[in-house]
Amino acid sequence: MDFLDKLNPQQRKAVTAADGPVLVVAGPGSGKTRVLTQRIAYLIASEGVRPWNILAVTFTNKAAKEMDLRVKAMLNDQATDGIMLGTFHSICARILRREVEHLPLESNFVIFDSDDQERIVKSIIKEFNLNDKLYRAASIHAAISRAKNELLGPDEYPINIYRDEVVKRVYVEYQKRLIASNAVDFDDLLVYTARLLEDNPSVRDKYAQRFRHVLVDEFQDTNLAQYSLVRQLASHHKNIYCVGDPDQSVYAWRGADYRNLKKFEEDFPEAEIVLLEQNYRSHQNILDAAMSVIDRARTPNRIKKKLFSDRGPGEKILFHEAYNDYDEAAFVVNTIAELVASRKFEPGDCAVMYRTNSMSRLLEEAFLQARLPYKLVGAQRFYGRREVKDVIAFIRLVHFKTIPAPAQSCLISHAAQIHPITNLSPAAPLCRSPISAACSPVGAR
């Protein structure tokens, strides 16, 4: 197996680990996807494990597809035919359709998306005559989702305050309507499967005996329902192989619990733990700074890692404490302008990350003033937002008594709700004012 020769010692140790529970604590950029896919290839090519005896789960369809392609590239399509590889939800859906006689559903049940789910909650709130400003559908649905992630059904939902009582009432009705529609939501896929395996030993044994090896990617992002699933599916052979890093757990808001790594150690005290500490992505200064911040979190019972890189120390990190948010934006943009002016970098070589979308406005204004092109990723430009453009158009109307032709219908629609406005004439070319600059950002894409 030539692919083993390309692994570093710790990666090789993880890939060739003996049978039994294994926890691979993989630091960022340490090649965890390579380790997981090569583990599958190693089991088939070296250990003689049949593909249909392997279960590999991850969180996204993209990650599942990439894993599948990598395994097939190392072996061949025929050698990998039969592996059950996919997301938690897709695998649970396949199991539920096969075992539907144990469920309050038909085999052709449908999976409601997030819009369908919220629409049901809205209708229940309306029928219960609840204040939809106080009990917003998104908030109520999020509470129901968190309960399902903790394997709490409508009857087990805890009540501490009056709001909990409201959530429970909606939860009960919500679940009734899903069943009446022969439907499930994404959380139900996990809950139904976890309870199916727990309440039906014969079903659990069938799948636990079939899957000689259970492999889990991004283990730090699993919730209680997902951990319960993999633990039960590995209950017969005990060959559970989990790859994750508690320091990279960022999905607590959707139920992920990094403490599952600690539960894993408690449930499988004989587990082999392998640390992947060599980083292939960053310079050492970046790793040292990141780990110094993480180490200060003082997370109890955390498995510590010492990340290292062969790429050298790299440039030192510059820390700038700004006087205010305007000074902060100016410093960022001026730094980028200097890099571009040096002709060693292009604007596209620079990236700016911020915590919330509301912080983009001052940065955008600074880019506009510096006449530097920028591209906003994953959000709408502040001056491109409809409500902002409407307000700017109103200001232009008041100040210049003219408006651009494309904005006339919008303005007339809004103005008609206030009072009639006459003499709305199409604008001449955009005026040279700060407002027009904001309406038409220089270089913004």
Image (spheres, rainbow, N blue to C red):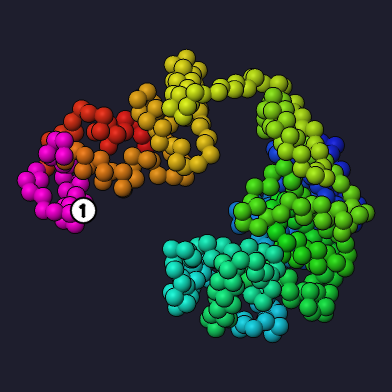
181 or 126: nearer the viewer: 126
The image quarter in which residue 418 lies: bottom left
- Secondary structure type for disc 1: helix
- The residue depicted at 27 percent of the width and 37 percent of the height is 439
In-front residue for pair 294/336: 294
Residue indicated by mark 1: 414
Q: Position of residue 285 (x, y in %)?
A: 69, 24
Q: Is residue 72 left or right of residue 46?
A: left
Q: Residues within 10 Å of mark 1 (few under 14, many from 20)?
A: few
Q: Is residue 239 visible to the viewer in this orientation of the structure?
A: yes
In this view, 259 is above or below 360:
below
Q: How many marks?
A: 1
Q: Is 340 a magenta residue?
A: no
Residue drawn 41% across the image and 32% down it: 362
**Magenta-highlighted residues:** 398-425
Residue 414 is a magenta residue: yes
Residue under the image location 9 percent in, 43 percent down: 425
- Find residue 9 and report its image quarter: top right
Residue type, numbered disc 1 = His
Q: Nearer the viewer, residue 191 or 282?
A: 191
Image quadrant containing the C terminus: top left
Q: Is residue 86 visible?
A: no
Q: Is residue 217 above or below residue 100?
A: above
Looking at the rendering, which quadrant does residue 340 occupy?
top left
Q: Is residue 267 left or right of residue 226?
A: right
- Residue farthest to the right? 270
Q: Residue furthest top?
A: 342
Residue 171, percent from left and from top: 58, 73
x, y percent for residue 115: 47, 66
